[in-house]
Amino acid sequence: MERTETRQKAPIGRPRGFDADVALEHAMRVFWAQGYEGTSLTDLTHAMGITRTSMYAAFGNKENLFRKALERYTEGPASYGARALLEPTARQVAAAFLVGSVRASTRPGCPTGCLGVQGSLAAGDLGSSARDALVTWRNEHTALLRDRFRQAVDQGDLPSGTDPEVLARYLMTVANGIAVQAAGGATRDALQQVADMALRSWPAA
């Protein structure tokens, strides 16, 4: 009679002792408040409640973590941008975009301003990758607005002589300015007045 040996399989991977989603949320808020270069690894691991080894294993290096945090920001606090594009008219798109910018930049319990604007404005060589990622991020959002306004021109919702590129950059510049002003302490009401003024000059079909 053959003897059969029973061997216990070792676990393939050691389970994480933390919630990666919660940790990423905390990392996003640190980058949002302090910017890429202003955030140290100690700041991140302290806020995330994990060790550096765990951070590297779960998210990669600081640059990769920043990119993941930016994705989370896009899907969370900055998701107003994608929703605004679904509005039926170009003016409603612009209104929803600016209102969303005001609210996201002055959100209770969150850092003021916008991660996508202030995250790496003053970055040196060490932060060049993060700065380039944010330039790409802002350009992509401008392009989405441009395409939506081009559609509005084709449909007669905007005057035929309207330049969709310029209009999109105008809207993005106002939104970026709102974020910078919010970071400087401007109130939600004051910034909403700025958004309302920008909409008063909106081109009529």
Image (cartoon, helix red, strand yellow):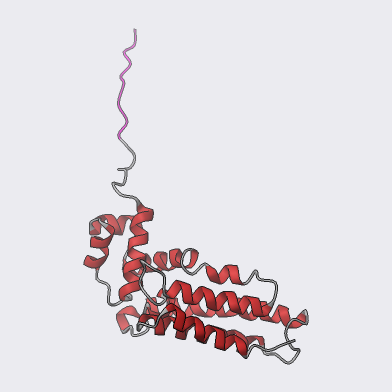
Residue 92: image quadrant is bottom right
Task: Tell whether 27 sits left or right of 52.
Answer: right
Residue at left 42%, top 76%? 114
Q: Report the front residue among 7 and 184.
A: 184
> Is 171 rendered above or below residue 18?
below
Asked whether residue 170 appears in the rendered view, the answer is: no
Residue 168, percent across and down? 60, 84
Q: Is residue 105 above or below residue 18?
A: below
Where 142 sits versus 51, above or below?
below
Does the magenta-highlighted stretch encompass residue 8? yes
The residue drawn where x is 49% and y is 64% is 75
| 140 left or right of 181 in image | right
Residue 61 falls inside the magenta stretch: no
Q: Position of residue 151 (x, y in %)?
A: 72, 78
Q: From the viewer's side, name the closer residue of 77 and 202.
A: 202
Depth order, front residue of 16/183: 183
* Quarter occupied by residue 23: bottom left
Q: In this view, does 9 lie above or below 28?
A: above
Range shown magenta: 1-10
Identity of the residue drawn at 36% across and 53% down: 20
Which residue is depicted at the point 37% across and 84% down?
Answer: 121
Q: Can residue 24 be seen in this view?
A: yes
Q: In which quarter of the image is the C terminus?
A: bottom right
